[in-house]
Amino acid sequence: MSVFRVRLDVRWGDLDAFNHVSNVTFLRYIEECRAAWLNSVPSHWRDGEFGPVVANINLNYRRPLLWPARIEVSLKPHSPGRSSIRLEHEIHSLNADGERVDLHADGTTTLVWLDWKKGESVPLPVALRELAARG
């Protein structure tokens, strides 16, 4: 699969006491990208019986992000396992022409598919496995 991207505006409320985007807000940006990506996957994974949980997030903060700014958050799925998939992320700021300029953060998220009633892992949906394999 090619890289999935969303563009977001940094909000005033995203800033911390040091006047740059809070570390936890970077995780929210990644979450918003991940939710949009999952919503775009042609699958019935949202049927209520099974679904994803975040098992691990690793994020490297490369440089502070200030307000105002427009950013691009990217996601690339790969390394599907039996019940999990790893997603690579990057957060770049954009210039006035919409071109990526600075890398502010990069990292990975591991999702695990669970049976909600049993609390046990289940096989990854085929649609997600196929997307990662095309990577």
Image (cartoon, rainbow, N blue to C red):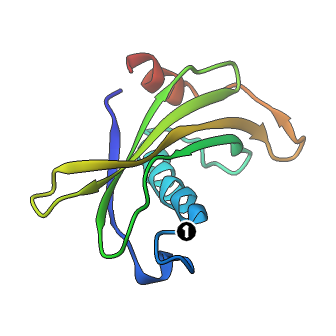
Across and down, in percent, residue 39 comes to 46, 50
Q: Nearer the viewer, residue 109 or 118?
A: 109
Q: Which residue is at 39% across, 21% downward?
A: 135
Q: Nearer the viewer, residue 4 or 30?
A: 30
Image position of 17 (left or right of 98): right
Q: Which residue is at 69% across, 45% downward?
A: 54
Q: Residue furthest left?
A: 97
Q: Nearer the viewer, residue 31 or 121?
A: 31
Across and down, in percent, residue 71 comes to 32, 59
**The N terminus, quarter of image:** top left
- Name the amino acid type tagged 1: Ser
Residue underneath mark 1 = 22
Q: Residue furthest right?
A: 118
Image position of 91 (left or right of 82): left
Image position of 64 (left or right of 119): left
Q: Residue furthest front?
A: 18
